[in-house]
Image: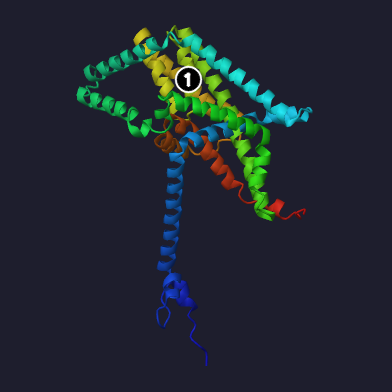
Amino acid sequence: MRTPDNSGARLSGAQPDGPTTLRTLLTDKLGWLGLRSAQILLALGLVAVIVLVLVQVKLVVIPVLIALILASALSPVIGWLRRRGLSAILSTWVTLLTAIVVFGGIITLIVLAVENQWNDLATSASDGIDELSTYLTEGPLGIDAAQIEAARNAGVDFLTSSQFGSGALAGVSVATEIITGAVLVVVILFFFLKDGDVIWKFFLRPFKGERLQRGRRIGTTTVRVLGGYVRGTAIVAFVDAAAIGIGLTILGVPLALPLSVIIFLTAFIPLIGATIAGILAALVALVANGWVVALIVVGIVVLVNQLEGNFLQPVVMAQSLKLHPLVILVALTAGTIVAGIIGAVLAVPIAAVGWAIVKTWNAPPELKSRPQLA
């Protein structure tokens, strides 16, 4: 006699004849869904705990991340010096001291050039907001003044809130944290430049075979993506600041130099950075030059951003930042909530590295088919 075949019942999700056991409860459709849901919740809980722990030690985590990004950007210089016969320690000192002199010189020149214009810039921006508010309330739009005041207060409350001011932004007001963070960045950067490959090999010592190869791919991908992101963003920021600054100068907009500096700095925050800088430039032009020039400034900012996004960024960024704008926006929001301004700057490169690691997690089929050397 043939025994009943329950394969159809299993495929359809129906319970087979016989007593219900723990195995059947866990292997039917509802049980499978419950197990997967529990696994997802467990993973999300683990991620939340890790984030909370990292936030508590942000004074160490943020310098480590900054040093890692800078080391990745400077890795071609280190490689070039070592190929020229310099020792690891000498190459490190040459690269580190050169970077400090260059960055310090640039910052000093910027501060000396614009230090006497920041108050005028803040006053012009405030006057521009007042003039825009007056137009919105008394002009053809007829917006209620209470609504504008509520929107302004909401923006001020957000900028001064604990969420926006937490982490690195709150630490800016504490000189000891600034000094400690800067010293940690320099020290950690020195060791990353000198022994970065050795440090990563140490972490990979427990792994063999395919896991070892995967770890090597992750290390190579991280350095490539972070380095390309920093170098590409710096080039894009410089081009944006130069192009918009020249346009402001030609139009006779005052405070063109500090506005160009702000454009350069905010370019390191994708999507919203350029928008903030463009709004500030338009407000200054509105107060000093009137509506026509302000609208021309807006047009210049939009044109430069379009040229950057469609032509310049794909060339200089290459594969470093292949993220959907929605992913960038979510990363920026999360980074700002967790670590303020510094979190907004670091969130996008971290997200880009994470996505690049996911794409290179498994070796391409042609590499897997090759015999592995012992």
Furthest-bottom residue in this view: 1
Residue drawn 67% across the image and 33% down it: 194
Residue drawn 39% across the image and 36% down it: 337
In the picture, which quadrant includes the C terminus? bottom right
Residue drawn 67% across the image and 25% down it: 95
Residue situated in front as seen by the camera: 298 or 54: 54
Residue drawn 34% across the image and 33% down it: 162
Residue situated in front as seen by the camera: 268 or 109: 109
- Residue 304 visible in rendering: yes
* Mark 1 burial class by Cα count in 10 Å: few <14, some 14-19, many 20+: many
- Residue type pointed to by label 1: Ile
Query: According to the image, label 1 marks what residue?
Result: 263
**x, y percent for residue 208:** 68, 54
Is the residue 63 above or below the residue 127 in the image? below
**Residue 226 sits in quarter:** top right
**x, y percent for residue 144:** 20, 24
Query: Judging from the image, what secondary structure is the residue with disc 1 in?
Result: helix
Is the residue 121 above or below the residue 155 in the image? above
**x, y percent for residue 234:** 56, 24
- Residue 290 visible in rendering: no
Q: Is residue 73 left or right of residue 63?
A: right
Residue situated in front as seen by the camera: 350 or 30: 350
**x, y percent for residue 318:** 61, 33
How many discs mark residues in the rendered view? 1
Residue situated in front as seen by the camera: 172 or 110: 172
Furthest-top residue in this view: 252
